[in-house]
């Protein structure tokens, strides 16, 4: 886990990443140009040993908290830390691991919300795990996961918001949604319901794919074509690592005056080989022995 700095800015500014044998990754989060407090939180669980020794794939997580300065930052950090811990200690396939960990994260936020001054707090959650040649995303709220491949950028998650529902029902257009007064009203989040529904997305991945997780402070001002362009630049070598790409996206959002906290989590695949090679199967077989 990466510790944020400085402490006086809520969850502070977080920046970490690495270049691995088959992929590079990065997590970047900052308060943004108009906020003195960061209620977003990001983290990664990526071992430094070669991935053929891993019993499960890497995990990257993003959460956007709500409920006021103290409560929002607590909700997002509680969710992320609980998810990472549950993922690291659980067993099963990548999708089983991630969904169970997301449920544990929700219960952790529900329990924390009973403490004085934290009533009503909640958070979005995005967890991304790699298993073999597949990416698995657990999702609640309106933070988004994208897949940038070639010249396209596909949104993998559905926004759990009032405007998101109206868009899916074709009650409003994308242009109307951009400025709708209910655009920030969530219909689903961690912390409010012990049995909240966790969306699970499974996506086959290949070399040169870029997976992007981001809070609404970023996707509200940075377009899908611009995220696709970042993926293309990573594939071409114009951007050398996921860290350069994440820094670019966050800087773009800040320069455009994003009114919220800004966070980006990136994974860029540089190989067609599975990550980890066993896709989690070896771990399940070993655990089943008497």
Image: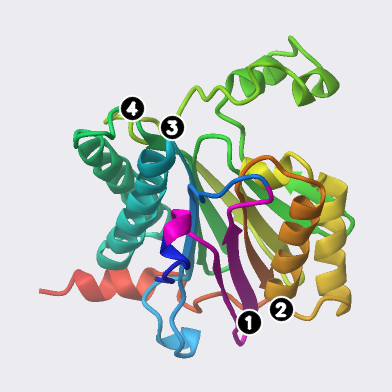
Where residue 211 sits, quadrant-wise, is bottom right
Q: Nearer the viewer, mark 2 or mark 4?
A: 4
Left or right: 83 with respect to 236? left
State the residue position of label 4.
Answer: 120
* Label annotation for residue 189: 3
Give the residue furthest to the bottom.
49
Q: Residues within 10 Å of mark 3 (few under 14, many from 20)?
A: many
Q: CA distance from mark 4 to mark 1?
A: 42 Å
Q: CA distance from mark 2 to mark 3?
A: 33 Å
* Label annotation for residue 270: 2
Could you tell which of marks 2 and 1 lies nearer the N-terminus?
Answer: 1
State the residue position of label 1.
Answer: 22
Instruction: Give the residue drawn at x 47%, y 68%.
Output: 5
Considering the image in quadrants, where does the C terminus appear? bottom left
**Of helix, strand and loop, which one carries label 2?**
loop
**2 and 1 marks in contact (CB < 8 Å):** yes
């Amino acid at each position: 886990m990466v510790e944020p700095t400085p402490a006086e800015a809520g969850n502070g500014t977080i920046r970490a990443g690495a270049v691995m044998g088959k992929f590079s990754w990065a997590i970047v989060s900052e308060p943004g140009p108009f906020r003195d407090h960061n209620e977003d939180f990001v983290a990664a669980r990526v071992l430094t040993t070669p991935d053929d020794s891993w019993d499960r794939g890497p995990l990257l997580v993003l959460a956007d908290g709500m409920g006021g300065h103290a409560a929002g930052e607590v909700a997002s950090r509680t969710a992320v830390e609980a998810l990472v811990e549950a993922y690291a200690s659980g067993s099963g396939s990548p999708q089983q691991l991630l969904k169970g960990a997301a449920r544990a994260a929700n219960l952790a936020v529900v329990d924390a919300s009973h403490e004085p001054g934290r009533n009503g707090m909640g958070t979005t959650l995005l967890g991304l795990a790699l298993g073999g040649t597949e990416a698995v995303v657990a999702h609640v709220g309106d933070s988004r996961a994208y897949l940038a491949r070639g010249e396209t950028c596909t949104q993998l998650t559905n926004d759990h918001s009032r405007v998101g529902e109206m868009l899916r029902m074709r009650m409003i257009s994308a242009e109307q949604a951009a400025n709708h007064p209910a655009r920030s009203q969530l219909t689903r989040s961690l912390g409010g319901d012990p049995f909240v529904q966790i969306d699970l997305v499974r996506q086959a991945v290949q070399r040169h794919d870029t997976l992007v997780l981001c809070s609404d402070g970023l996707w509200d001002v940075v377009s899908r074509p611009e995220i696709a362009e970042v993926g293309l630049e990573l594939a071409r070598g114009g951007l050398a690592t996921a860290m350069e790409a994440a820094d670019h996206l966050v800087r773009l959002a800040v320069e455009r005056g994003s009114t919220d906290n800004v966070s980006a989590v990136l994974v860029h695949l540089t190989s067609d080989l599975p990550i980890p090679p066993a896709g989690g199967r070896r771990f399940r077989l070993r655990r089943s022995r008497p």
